[in-house]
Structure formats: C-alpha cells, structure tokens
Image (cartoon, rainbow, N blue to C red):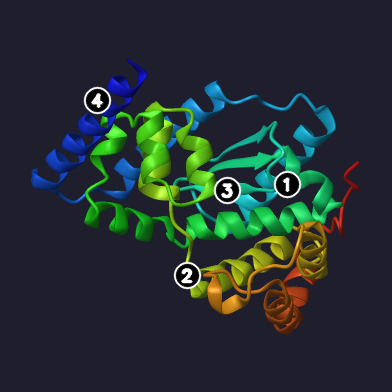
Amino acid sequence: MKKIGLKFIFIALALFITSCSTAPTSDVSESEINAEAAKAYAEIKAKSKISQNAQWNAMVQRVAQRIAKASGENFKWEYVLIESPEVNAWCMPGGKIAVYTGIMPVLKTEGALAAVLGHEVAHATLRHGMKGYARAKQNNYWGLIAAGASVIGGQLLCKTDQCRKLSQLGGVAAGFAITFLDRKFSRADESLADHMGQIYMARAGYDPHEAIQLWDRMSASKSGASAPEWMSTHPSDQNRKSQLTSWLPKAEQIYESAPQHYGVGSSIR
C-alpha cells in the first residue's frame, strides 16, 4: 500500500509540473512575489519552533530593525528567531527575515549578527531573489506556490539543504522554497551582498571590522575542509575577508558618520 501511495504521489506531481509547463505563463509583479513570500513566511512561522530565548530574540529584533532602517528600503519588514541547529539566516523578497538559533553561538557578537543580516538584507534590496523567480518561471515551478507543494515533491525537486528543510513543512512554504530559495546566488551576487551588507551595518552603527572577523568564526565552525572556491558559487571565506578588508576604508567613513555607535554590541552567550 505504501509503494502504491508513493507511486501515485510521484505521478500526480509529474502531471502537475507538466500542466504548469503547458499552461500559458504571464509576468508576475514584484508586489505579487512579495505577497506570496509573506504567505510562505507566515506558514513557516506557524509550523516552526520559535525560540523562547529572550536575550537572543531581543538582539535579533533590534539588530534587524537597525539594518532594515539603514537599507532605506520601504519593505513590510518582519523578523523571527527559529529554534534550529542550522548555522543559517535568510531574507525573503519583501523583507521577511529568519535567523536560526544555530548561528548565534558562532557569531559571538551583536556586530557579527549585524554583518550577517546586512548581507541577507542586501540580497533582498538588490532584488537577487528576482533572479530566482526568473529561473523558477523558466522551469515552470511558479504554480507550485499557488497549489502548495507536497512534502515528497519538495524533496524530489529541491537541490539545496535549505530548500529541503523548508519543503518538509509542505504547502505554500514548500512551494516558495522550491521556487525561490532552491538556488545559490552567483559569486558576483554574493560579493555585492557582502559589500552592501558591510555598508548597511556601518550605517546602522556597527563596527564594520566585525564583518571581517565573522568569516574567521564561520571557518572555525565548519567540520572538515571547505570546498575550493571554483567548485562553489560562494566566494571562499578567505576571499571574502580580503574583499571586506579592501572595502573597509569606505565602510569606516560611513561608520564614523553614523548617528549612533554600537561598536560590536553585546556578546552572544
């Protein structure tokens, strides 16, 4: 019975994707994309374990608010701290931010959190997620959001761990993960998000040196050697440090002119 049921799901998923590919497609506006992101975000929050760590929650809220303001983008910003061992954070199109508790001990300082959130917010403000939409539209996955992807369907279609984790929630969250989050940004996009993220954190009053220190901590947290840069769309940790160091003089000028100076902020315990 289980094999028959699984086979039925596979066939249904295949038919659904085929129907998407034969149906006429139309342009989807940024406002529509942001609205779908908001639905998926609400579902993710409802189905995830929200952290009850009062200190960490307060830190995520204040840092995210400061970075959002520094970006100058008029999104409908939201922030949540999710209880999960993943060393991860993300920002959906339209300013929907999630931080996983697993990253907090690695960061060590509030300033490092500002660097991470600056980077993720930059992906959203630079509309890098729109490229994800273009790929999704090319692969005819847009309909998965409206229909709500199945858990098994998500596991079949996902290529990244982040997508697989969110697809386990099923529904709109899985559809959005498959459509928008199942890709890695290009190296150029990652470098630009690093650059803008350092500017955002400096503008928000956090010491931009901490963006450089962050990558030493990220490297130390990895088990085993990281893949060579040419095998990944992400720049290597060392290359990121070098780039951030080269951009530091400009970021320091921005930091000096910021209305408030928080330095590296509070320690994360």
Name the amino acid type tagged 1. Val
Residue that carries the numbered disc 1 in the rendered image: 63
Q: Residues within 10 Å of mark 3 (few under 14, many from 20)?
A: many
User: Label 3 amino acid?
Assistant: Trp
| Residue 223 % position (x, y) | 77, 57
Tell me which numbered mark, 4 or 1, is placed earlier along the sequence: 4
Where, by quadrant of the figure, is residue 147 drawn? top left
- Disc 4 or 2, which lies upstream in sequence? 4
Quadrant assignment for the N terminus: top left
Marked residue nearer the N-terminal end (2 or 3): 3
| Residues at marks 2 and 3, CA–CA distance in whole angstroms | 16 Å
Residue at the image position 45 percent from the left and 45 percent from the top: 94
Mark 4 touches mark 1? (CB < 8 Å):
no
The mark nearer the N terminus, 3 or 1, is: 1
- The Cα–Cα distance between marks 3 and 4, rounded to whole angstroms, is 34 Å
The residue tagged 4 is: 8
Q: Which of the two marks, 4 or 2, is nearer to us in this view?
A: 4
Q: Dot 3 lies on which element?
A: strand
> Mark 2 — residue?
186
Which one is in front in this view, the residue at disc 4 or the one at disc 1? 4
Compared across the picture, whether 145 is left or right of 67 comes to left
Provide the secondary structure element on which disc 4 rests.
helix
The quarter of the rendered structure image containing the C terminus is top right
